[in-house]
């Protein structure tokens, strides 16, 4: 591509506008759901009598997203990203529907686990689509659009979810996103029809199976940490400690070498981003719960608190 062609190329030109719009919409809606659920979870746990499983509703989704990432990455490498993307988005929508129609906390948790598979999977699949469909010169612009699709929901998502839960019903925080995701998916699916996204390359199946099994172990251990809160302290703390140890061991082959020792370069970046994200999401999960249960905030005002934190 010449300099003039590069300057003229855009992620919003006629060839790519609908794929770009659909991909950004999928990222935006996944972000809305991830951030909105923090505001509605206190209401959900009270309505479904599942306060003791509050932590699992968050930990489970993050845990299964690891499985979704690994599985979708392997699928995309082996057979191309099209089928992987379709499967991941479908799982995300199915998970939202299960959660939205749940009548017990355990049904709700099943939906959250399925959502995690879809969320992790569609993110990886979309990145592969970008790599295959867009010229390298446009990759930075696409990823910048994806980043913006996360920033905006962090500012308005919790407030909107709180208002929906307070003035309509908490179920619409899930069902509404499911409907919008289906629409965004239809846009990108139609535009990708007939587009050559590659068919993948032969992969080491043994290595793929090992990575997937490790991801499953990490997910089970992460969910186990949440369930340990239901145990007596004499059993809960040791169970949580064992789960953390299992996660640390299982993650080693999935992370860059020397990550847990904060090695220079990429390992230290991965470690610090993981610690920062963990602290952020842990605080975000419990701040609305604290405000609503301890201080009597409404869901809308608890969402405002998170919105202001995003601006800070």
Image (cartoon, helix red, strand yellow):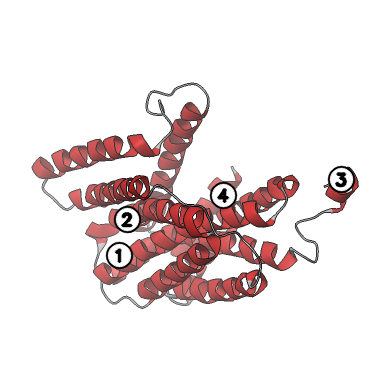
Please identify the quadrant where the C terminus is shown.
Answer: top right
Give the vertical position of 73 relative to 106 (above or below).
Answer: above
The location of residue 109, given as percent across then percent down, is 30, 65
109 vs 163, nearest the viewer: 109
- Of labels 2 and 4, the one closer to you: 2
The location of residue 208, given as percent across then percent down, is 37, 49
C-alpha span from label 2 to label 4? 27 Å
- Of labels 1 and 3, the one closer to you: 3
- Residue corresponding to mark 3: 2
On screen, residue 134 versus residue 183, left or right, reads: right
Q: Secondary structure at mark 3?
A: loop
192 vs 66, nearest the viewer: 192
- Of labels 4 and 3, the one closer to you: 3
Q: Secondary structure at mark 4?
A: helix
Quadrant in the rendering for residue 53: bottom left
Q: Which mark is residue 109?
A: 1
On screen, residue 207 versus residue 305, left or right, reads: left
Do tag 2 and tag 1 residues touch (Cβ < 8 Å)? yes
Q: Which mark is residue 144?
A: none
Q: If you read the primary sequence from the N terminus, does the residue marked by circle 1 or circle 3 appear first? A: 3
Disc 1 residue crowd, few under 14, some 14–19, many 20+, Cα 10 Å: many
Do tag 2 and tag 3 residues touch (Cβ < 8 Å)? no
């Amino acid at each position: 591509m010449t300099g003039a062609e590069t300057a003229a190329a855009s992620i919003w030109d006629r060839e790519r506008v609908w794929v770009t719009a659909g991909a950004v919409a999928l990222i935006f809606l996944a972000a809305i759901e991830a951030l909105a659920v923090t505001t509605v979870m206190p209401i959900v746990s009270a309505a479904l009598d599942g306060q003791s499983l509050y932590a699992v509703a968050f930990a489970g989704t993050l845990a299964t997203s690891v499985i979704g990432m690994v599985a979708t990455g392997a699928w995309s490498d082996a057979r191309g990203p099209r089928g992987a993307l379709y499967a991941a988005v479908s799982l995300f929508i199915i998970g939202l529907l299960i959660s939205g129609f749940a009548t017990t906390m355990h049904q709700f948790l099943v939906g959250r686990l399925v959502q995690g598979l879809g969320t992790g999977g569609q993110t990886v699949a979309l990145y592969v689509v970008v790599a295959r469909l867009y010229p390298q010169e446009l990759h930075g612009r696409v990823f910048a659009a994806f980043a913006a699709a996360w920033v905006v929901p962090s500012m308005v998502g919790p407030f909107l979810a709180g208002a929906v839960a307070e003035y309509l019903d908490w179920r619409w925080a899930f069902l509404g996103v499911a409907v919008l995701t289906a629409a965004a998916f239809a846009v990108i699916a139609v535009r990708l029809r007939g587009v050559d996204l590659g068919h993948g390359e032969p992969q080491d199946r043994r290595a793929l199976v090992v990575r997937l099994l490790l991801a499953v172990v990490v997910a089970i251990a992460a969910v186990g940490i949440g369930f340990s809160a239901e145990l007596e302290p004499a059993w809960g703390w040791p169970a949580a400690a064992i789960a953390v140890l299992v996660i640390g061991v299982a993650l080693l082959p999935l992370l860059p070498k020397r990550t847990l020792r904060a090695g220079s370069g990429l390992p230290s970046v991965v470690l610090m981003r993981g610690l920062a994200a963990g602290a952020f999401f842990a605080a975000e999960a419990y701040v609305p719960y604290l405000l609503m249960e301890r201080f009597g905030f409404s869901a809308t005002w608890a969402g405002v608190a998170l919105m202001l934190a995003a601006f800070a």
